[in-house]
Amino acid sequence: MTKVFNKVGIIYNSDFFEAEALAKIIQLKIDNSKVSSIDNFLDDIDLAVIIGGDGTFLKAARHYCKNDIPILGFNIGRLGYLAQAKPQDVDFVIEKLNNNNFEIENRLMLKSCDKTALNDIVIKGTNCSRSATLDLFINDKKLCSYVADGLIISTPTGTTAYSLSAGGPIVSPMLDCFLIIPICPHTLNMRPLIIPSSEKIRVSNHEKDANLNISFDGQNEVISEVDVVIEKNENCAKLLILDKQKDKFYDILKEKLHWSLSPKK
């Protein structure tokens, strides 16, 4: 592995009891590697191996995008949609890395309020007991007002997450676009919208004295008293994808979301 990655960081989520043990097993198989918990990121590395669930992976993606460090996930959570491997796949992963049998995919990210997101940015009113009226502007031109529980601004990567649950389409991560999906809109004529990633999105609360609750990948949250502007992040998340297959995205859809499969009798 030293031919490709000189320094490997193995970062685990201590909330999973088996995570640290798996990290140490992987460390024994990789020269010049270090182990740390998700609470203390290792930065002087060429590759980050992430052990945990999807939340762990998203947190790592937001951190490592700043330094263009690729990330590879081992899932020990529930779904692990973004992870490439399971604990029993350690030897398989090492072999793929040693043989250079992988590719690095650049995944679009969002930015707003000095924060980033790989999956999505969700905007809601601060009063969770009723719908909010949210004004949407594209390139500073007002497009419409949504009466809804909120808005999801999603990357293609995030279209298999919250966006999908809210009725949004599945979009290939190879497309250069963002999605705007209303959450439980109080009308039948409001549908998901796909726009180029070069567009500037601005959302404001129609009730000028009301705040906005903004969450990033369902983890970091901020309260804004003014409009929120969402744009394409200048940095991309670099996902290490095992096997150089052009259709890997569709394979994962079938494997983890059971897409296109008939119900079992």
Image (cartoon, rainbow, N blue to C red):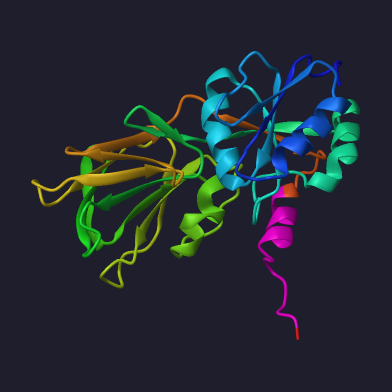
Query: For the C terminus, which image quadrant?
Result: bottom right
Q: Residue 253 colored magenta? A: yes
Whole-percent x, y for residue 79 in the image: 65, 56
Residue 236 image point, x, y percent: 55, 29
| Image location of residue 187, percent across then percent down | 26, 71
| Horizontal arrangement in the rendering, residue 48 relative to residue 191 (left or right) | right
Along the viewing direction, whichever of 178 and 222 lies nearer the viewer: 222
Whether residue 90 sits left or right of residue 226 in the image: it is: right
The quadrant where residue 68 appears: top right
Residue drawn at 40 percent across, 59 percent down: 192
Camera-side residue of 27 and 206: 27
Q: Is residue 227 above or below residue 11?
A: below
Name the residue furthest left. 209
Q: Residue at x 13, y 48 (%)?
A: 210
| Picture layout, residue 124 above or below residue 236 | below
* Magenta-drawn stretch contains 130: no
Residue 47: give x, y in percent of width and height: 71, 23
Residue 84: quarter of image: top right
What span is colored magenta in the figure? 249-264
Identity of the residue drawn at 22% across and 51% down: 126
